[in-house]
Image (cartoon, coloured by chain):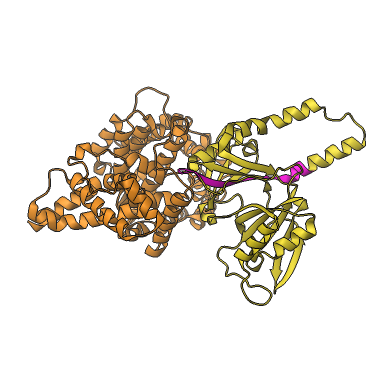
Chain colours: A yellow, B orange
Amino acid sequence: MKYLMIHALDEDATPRTGSNGEPLELAAWIEEMEARGVVLDGARLHPVSDATSVRAPNGTVVVTDGPFAETKEQVAGYDVIDCPDLDSAIAVAAAHPTTGAGSIELRPFDEGMPDPEVPESVPDGKRRYLMLVCADMRRAMAAELDATEVHADSVPERSSADDEEEDEPIDRWIADAGARRLYGWPLAFPDTAVTVRRVDGEVVTTDGPFAETKEQIAGYDLLECTDLDDALEVASSHPVAATGVIELRPLRL
Amino acid sequence: MVHTSHDAVARSFTESWGRLVAGLIAWCGDWDLAEECAAEAFAAAVPAWETTGVPDSPLAWLTTVARNRARDRLRRRTTEDAKLALASAGATDQVAPADDADIPDERLRLIFTCCHPALPMPARVALTLRTLCGLTPAEIGRAFLVTEPTMEKRLVRARAKIKNAGIPYRVPPPELWPERVEGVLGVLYLMFNEGYAASSGESLLRVDVSTEAIRLTRSLVDLLPTEPEVRGLLALLLLTDARRPARVRDGRVVPLAEQDRSRWDRGLVLEGTRLLDDDPPWGPYAVQARIALCHDVAARPDGTDWAAIADLYSLLPATPVIELNRAVALSMAHGPEAALPLVESLAGDLAGYYLYAATRADLCARLGRTDEAVAALETAIAQAPTGAERRLLRERRDALLAR
């Protein structure tokens, strides 16, 4: 199963240390996890002061400075990992140095995600941005629940034609983004999240996302664009921008 | 002779700083380096122009000196960034164009980048004042009542975001035009208002940011001659600034109705009026400029065409504050009873806004409802943001109580 590891750090805080007091090593983690074929993609992000958010209610694009939600801990990086189950994903997360300084939220991807293929080098004149697609998921979760109950009552199922229609906006968006989008995939609902921290050197796993905010990360895309305006154009035309918010974070390469 | 050189450099600084920095950023892509070397070029101009005289093309002279300094610094650095900057700037010591007229004016790119919506608003204002007007962090800090290190940090963070997030250095393409032009005008308007509010005499040290805002908007009118709202904004700033000589007396703000109108600057009123298009549609800045003009052309307060002002307010987006202003105009045109229902309908939206309470107080007082008026004034006094405004409201309250 593929999971997204969301590294959440309080940029103003001093890092905590590992169980024996010594700093946990990032290089060692990467080396081990790549050798085991666990890590498929990952990157660190520029600080949250470099974040830009975009919304497009009623088709009017509104660009604002800052992240999608003002929380103490902020997204500082991500890794895509492939593990047999949640317990092994938790073990992989627990071994990461982020747990000595902040939190790691683990979120399963929706099923069917292909292995991301991200070229090592960025072409001249291009930059990479992590695009966090954020939405108020309570509504979506409630809708899902309703749909399940509807099934149970054996009311006619949604026809496949409806499904196709529903998929249309995102497919059109992917086509429009073209080469500016390297890959992306939706995440399972936030109620599937677990967060891994270290408290007094001990690994603590809690239920739920790293921060309880109205809008939650619903998925992400990795963009490769010429500049922020180029990335904003892609982000603002995402179907979720109409109801939710898209955060753009430049990758630290 | 020393004076002449100093004056010439000071004049060049006012006229050319923005163009020099904008051109240097376009040339090397490094904001810090561009600013540092522009400052050094001006410093070098003082002794140089004293001996050789002021060059025929000061901007070309400054550009050549600044580019040479930038090249020297880049060569001494060994980082990848420096190599890139040097490559984009051209490693050969070719001289900058010898004539000012041959140097492209890159200020439009600079102002659109400084006012990019991805930057926090205070950073947009600070960056614009630093890079386009040449104000130092200490001066900008004083203008916005923050310390120099705080302002310096704000500028550093803004430049870091431009670099890290890849905010482009360009004039935006047509599809982004309306949004981005509006953004630039918003920054200039905010800058003017901050400066205008600060000129109330509480801090004489504060740099005149309003004048910088007007100067920049004037340049923008030249750079964007086809944008009616740029002219509308300049008209609004001039028609408001025209009243500045009468706005403060003995360190206190004088209300419009009590200002000595003979002190208003007729030259600015005339210039502002000429900028306005006769025929609608008018954008929000042009409408506000026309409202300012209604006041400016009234020889006495009771000669103000309040009905026209109320009509103009109805052309603006109906936000609670605009509606409050429209209500004031209606009360002046048709009496307080005509405006009170509109004012009271805004109670929920404007509960924390001192001018809401002050307006209600005024209407109640005019209707003879003194107790209500005094109570509303107490609220306004508690909510007013500055000492000068509180003083004015207290005087009004005391006058009511003395009746």
The N terminus of chain B: image quadrant: bottom left
The location of residue A13, given as percent across then percent down, is: 58, 67
Q: In this view, does B270 lie above or below B365?
A: above
x 79%, y 39%: residue: A143
Q: Nearer the viewer, residue A236 or B137?
A: A236
* Residue B357 painted magenta: no
Q: Is residue B391 visible?
A: no
Q: Nearer the viewer, residue A140 or A202?
A: A202
x 24%, y 39%: residue: B103
The location of residue B77, given as percent across then percent down, is: 34, 60
Quadrant location of residue B47? bottom left
The location of residue B354, given as percent across then percent down, is: 50, 51
Residue sitting farthest toward the front: A35
Q: Where are the magenta residues, as a range?
A: A123-141
User: From the viewer's perspective, is B190 left or right of B39?
Assistant: right
Residue sitting farthest toward the bottom: A20
The location of residue A57, given as percent across then percent down, is: 60, 36
Q: Which of B118 and B227 is in front in this view?
A: B118
* Residue A136 painted magenta: yes
Q: In this view, does A245 lie above or below A58?
A: below
x 57%, y 49%: residue: B351
User: From the viewer's perspective, is B397 left or right of B341?
Assistant: left
